[in-house]
Image: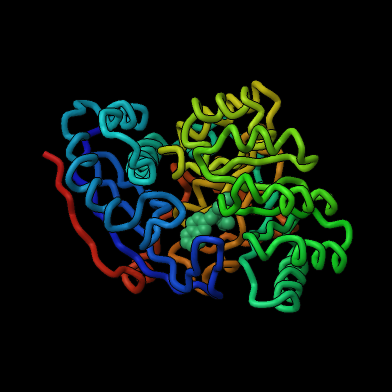
Amino acid sequence: MKLEGVEILHIAMPLVGAFRTSFGTEAVRETLLLRAVTDEAEGWGESGASEAPLYSGEHTHGVADVLARHLIPALAAAPDLDAHSVAPALSAFKENRLAKAALETAILDADLKARGIPLSYALGAVRRSVASGVSVGIADSIPDLLDTVDGYLADGYLRIKLKIEPGWDVEPVRAVRERFGDIVLQVDANASYERSDIDDLLALDDFDLSLVEQPLPADDLLGHAMLGRRLATPICLDESIVSARAAATAIELGACRIVNIKAGRVGGYLEARRIHDVCAAHGVPVWCGGMLETGVGRAANVALAALPGFTLPGDTSASERYFAEDITEPFRLVDGHLAVPTGPGIGVSPDPDALARFTVSRQWVPVR
Ligand code: NPQ
Ligand code: MG
C-alpha cells in the first residue's frame, strides 16, 4: 500500500451538555480527524486531543503540527506501508501518543478496508456487542446529579461512573448509592488527589464501588501501590498506563488491579491490544475508556472492547450521550450494549454533509 497523503481536519461539535471533570469543563468537542489516502483505500482516524492540554500534554494544534511536520513525512520512507509498519516508522519520535494513534488508526482503517477485514476481527474480538457504561461529569448540585444519573439508568446503561475531585466525592457517591441502590458504580478522579488526601479516598470504601480510577498523579505508581494496600476498593489506572511496559510495571508493583485502556493514550490500537494481552496474562480485568469520540473514534473503541479481556462495561456510550448529531451513523444503546461494527476497517466513514458542517479547517499533507 502506498500512502499518498493525509488530510488533517479540525472539527468542533457541540456537546449535548457541558462535561465537567477535575481538569476543566467542555461545552464543544474540538478535536482532529485524519483521512489517510492510499493507492488502495481511504482510512479514518480520530485524535483524542482537546483544544487545551488538560487531560494529557497533547492538544489539537500541537498534534496537527507534529503530524504535519514529523509523523506524516516519516511514513514517506516506508516502501510498502501497512498498519504494522506505522509504529516502527514513528518510534524515533518521543511520546506524542495521541498523534501517533490517530495516524496509525487512519492507516489501519485504510489497510483493513483494502483487505475487506473488520477491525474487530483484526484485533481478535469475540463479541458482537459490548456492554456499555456512562461517565457522568461533576454536577452543579446533588439533585442535578441524581436527575442525570436517573436518566442514564432509564436509558439502560449497565454501570455509572462518577467524576470526582477533592470536595466532590463522598457526598455525591453517597447520594447516588442511597438513591439508586444496587447499581454498578465506580468513580474517576483524573489524578486530582495527592497522597496526603488518603483519608478522603479511604472514605470511598463505604460505598461498594467497583473501582476508583486514577486517584493520584500519572507518574505516582508507588503512591497508587501504597494506597492500594489500604483501600479495599480496587484501584484502576488510566493516565498512568501509557504503554504495555507501563502496564506490566504497574501490575508487578501492585499499583492497580484493573486497567482502563484508551488507544489514544497508548499510541494506537495495536499497542492497546498488547496491553489487553499483558493484563489478560496477569488476570487483570480491562475496560475500554473514552475521550468524547465522534462516531469515527467510537467505532474503533467498540471493536477493541469486543476482545475477551474486556470483562467490565466500558465508557463506550451511545453517540447521543454526547452529540445531538454525530458525523457517522449514530451508535445506539440496545439493552445496555452497542453493536460491534461489521464492515471492513472501523466499519464507518463520516457523512460528507455532517463533516462539512462541523469542520473548522482542513490541511492536506502530501507524502512524496
Ligand atoms: C477519562 N473520559 O476516563 C476520560 C477523560 C476525558 C469519558 O470520562 C474533553 C472533555 C476531552 C473531557 C477527554 C471520560 C476529554 C474529556 C478525556 C475527558 O478520564
Ligand atoms: Mg479516566
Q: Is residue 251 above or below residue 169?
A: above
Viewer-nearest residue: 41 or 280: 280
x, y (%) of residue 65?
22, 51
What color scheme is it?
Answer: rainbow
x, y (%) of residue 260?
60, 42
Q: Would residue 34 be visible to someone looking at this image?
A: yes
Q: Is residue 64 above or below residue 155?
A: above
Viewer-nearest residue: 109 or 322: 322
Q: Residue at x 59, y 45 (%)?
A: 216
Q: Is residue 183 left or right of residue 194?
A: right
Q: Quadrant of the N terminus?
A: top left
Q: Residue at x 32, y 57 (%)?
A: 60
Q: Is residue 309 left or right of residue 327?
A: right
Q: Quadrant of the C terminus?
A: top left
Q: Would residue 126 be visible to someone looking at this image?
A: no
Q: Is residue 179 left or right of residue 299?
A: right
Question: In the rendered image, which quarter is residue 148 located in?
Answer: bottom right
Q: Is residue 191 above or below residue 241?
A: below
Q: Residue at x 38, y 49 (%)?
A: 57
Viewer-nearest residue: 55 or 72: 55
x, y (%) of residue 253?
62, 25
